[in-house]
Amino acid sequence: MDGIGVLMTCPMFAHLEQELAKRFKLYRLWDYPSPRRFFETHSGSIRAVVGNTKVGADAELIHALPRLEMVATYSVGLDKIDLGKCREKGIRVANTPDVLTDDVADVAIALMLCVLRKVCGCDAFVRSGKWKSRDFGFTTKFSGQSIGIVGLGRIGSAIAKRAEAFGCPISYHSRSEKPRVSYKYYPSAVELARHCRILVVACALTAETRHIIGREVLDALGPEGVLINIGRGAHVDEPELVSALLEGRLGGAGLDVFENEPEVAEELLRMDNVVLLPHVGSDTVETSTVMADLVLANLEAHFAGNPLPTPVI
Ligand code: NAP
């Protein structure tokens, strides 16, 4: 498959880049001063694109690559791919579901524990030497807190399973009620927020779920409530989140994702009731390796004329 042109949209995991370079004629979009300059010389050579959560395949990129057959994303989320355009042009799409579920669910639990038990504040307290002059103070119990999950898919279900082990009652909101689960279903995110202490966002980002967490949901969650977002930044209306926290209408937040990554609202940086992570939900060496291998397996299957291991389209 040496001669097949594959385009990586931005730097990702080094193992993926190395393995792609061994198997295909690899082009790196970031090697060029602008995408336009790349398209001027190589647009006719590219048969597959490898994107991720930062740069995927939007309508402009798809339009610029007339021989594009496949988009293989190094992510489970599909929000950076113009799926409608791919369908229209008969372009295959594959992602990396399941293999990252455990890691992202682990991070969701870590955020809940960090916000309620103030783990980061405790760590800073010890390092600063303040412990020598006084005790840290009290935090909030996590075990047994009611948890509401927006999006009871693969990751949402894995979070629920973990939270159950902490004795937390679980409820959820998804597009559809799941007949096989015993958790309580609420038909809207607002209703769910009214009935839980910790609200976790774990749904897919689509036109319908953009800003699914706005003022009404945050007010329903209330001054004792905590928002955890391990989905995508655009699920949350970030200015509304900042206002709710500043005005004490929301108790705290744990965020792995932001609306305008890597930019984070200045106000959030100064709050001690929020924990901020740089979008690292699935970023373990183990999971990144398996995700990379899945991207490679999908590309190889496509070019060998075999069924894709994890097809989206
Ligand atoms: P999944 O199994 O496809 O689950 C997606 C869930 O979203 C489903 O429960 C679905 O509900 C729900 N959903 C879709 N549209 C909705 C709507 N309009 N209203 C309410 N719920 C809606 O996907 P997954 O593997 O769990 O991944 C979920 C998301 O996590 C990804 O799309 C990605 O954005 C995010 N993620 C983040 C990281 C990170 O590093 N932080 C890593 C991986 C993934 P139904 O079941 O009713 O259809």
Image (cartoon, helix red, strand yellow):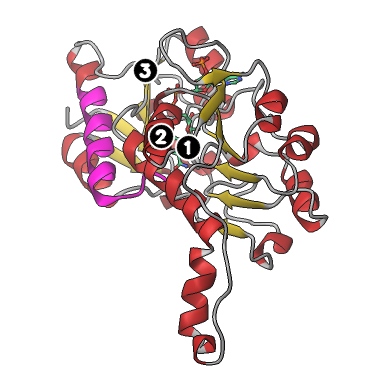
Q: CA distance from mark 2 to mark 3?
A: 43 Å
> With respect to residue 224, does 73 lie above or below?
above
Which residue is found at the position 41% from the left and 42% from the top?
166
Identity, as a three-letter code, of the amino acid under mark 2:
Glu
> With respect to residue 8, does 31 lie above or below?
below
Residue 313 falls inside the magenta stretch: no
The image position of residue 20, as x and y in percent, is: 23, 39
Q: Looking at the rendered structure, which numbered label has been put on residue 164?
A: 2
Prevailing secondary structure class for the magenta stretch in the rendered image: helix
The image position of residue 162, as x and y in percent, is: 37, 37
- The residue mark sitting in front, 1 or 3, is 1
The part of the image, by quadrant, that contains residue 118 is bottom right
What range is drawn magenta here?
Answer: 281-300
**Residue in the foreground of this view, choosing between 32 and 71:** 71
Q: CA distance from mark 1 to mark 3?
A: 46 Å
The earlier-in-sequence mark between 2 and 3 is: 3
Name the residue carrying label 3. 69
> Within 8 Å: ligand 1 and the Cβ of disc 1?
no
Name the residue carrying label 1. 168
Residue contact between numbered discs 2 and 1, judged by CB atoms under 8 Å: yes
The image position of residue 204, as x and y in percent, is: 53, 26
Which residue is found at the position 41% from the left and 51% from the top?
31
Q: Is residue 203 visible?
A: no
